Image: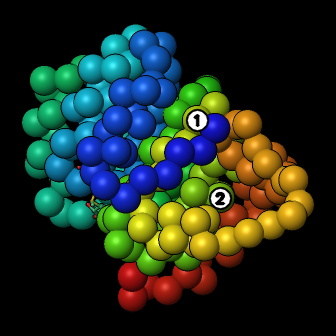
Amino acid sequence: MIHISYDRRKYQEDMINNIETFDNVVEIGCHIGVSTKIISRLNQDGTVYAFDNSPESSEAMKNLGIEYNNIIFTQADVRDENVLYDLMNRCENIDVLCVDLGGGYHPDTVFKVFFIWSSVLKPRVTLIRNRGLIDFINSSVSTEEIKSDEGFLESSANEIKPNNLNELKYWSDKL
Ligand SMILES: C[S@@+](CC[C@H](N)C(=O)[O-])C[C@H]1O[C@@H](n2cnc3c(N)ncnc32)[C@H](O)[C@@H]1O
């Protein structure tokens, strides 16, 4: 299932309603770990792989990792394919993917990060926080029944192969 919100409280409610004790969770855009703490308490028998490229995140997440022993933080730009390759090498199964690059952040980038990471990791559930994507969903109508029950797009996820992720390099660096 894919859940999408804009309000931070709803994003956190989605975490509470969907994350289970043994889940391994990837959190993209953890910032200083406010939601990471919630995830870490929910998946006490799993691991939270948290990512953010902000310099502010580093110290805060290091301190959080001392208090919460199931959090592994990586300071990195999630548009870099090597970040995803590296994660694939060090974890076996991801159950939940959380994506919050900023609620008002460019929906095109958020969608692309969601699409690539979820297609490769194939989570059971994805939680996204982004206003533009909600606007797109709520403003769209389709008469065709193309739909996924998993946390990735079942109609097109298998078209993404790790060796064609280098298209990530061409994303704008102005974001
Ligand atoms: C609104 S904050 C996330 C807040 C956090 N999810 C929470 O609930 O407290 C968005 C974060 O996304 C991070 N971010 C934006 N673009 C990114 C990118 N390309 N790679 C990694 N992190 C990124 C920003 O540095 C920022 O810390």
- Residue at image position (21%, 43%) is 33
**Mark 1 Cα within 10 Å, few/some/many (few <14, many 20+)?**
many
Residue type (three-letter) at the residue carrying disc 2: Phe
Q: Nearer the viewer, residue 25 or 148?
A: 148
* In this picture, residue 17 sits left or right of residue 37: right
Q: Nearer the viewer, residue 127 or 114?
A: 127
> In the rendered picture of this protein, how many numbered marks are placed on residues?
2
Q: Nearer the viewer, residue 108 or 168?
A: 108
Establish if 164 lies above or below 65. Answer: below
* Mark 1, residue position: 125
Q: Which mark is residue 152?
A: none
- Residue at image position (36%, 27%) is 16
* In this picture, residue 2 sits left or right of residue 74: right
Label 2's element?
Answer: helix
**Mark 2 Cα within 10 Å, few/some/many (few <14, many 20+)?**
some
Which image quarter: residue 136?
A: bottom right
Q: Position of residue 48 (x, y in %)?
A: 38, 31
* Mark 2, residue position: 115
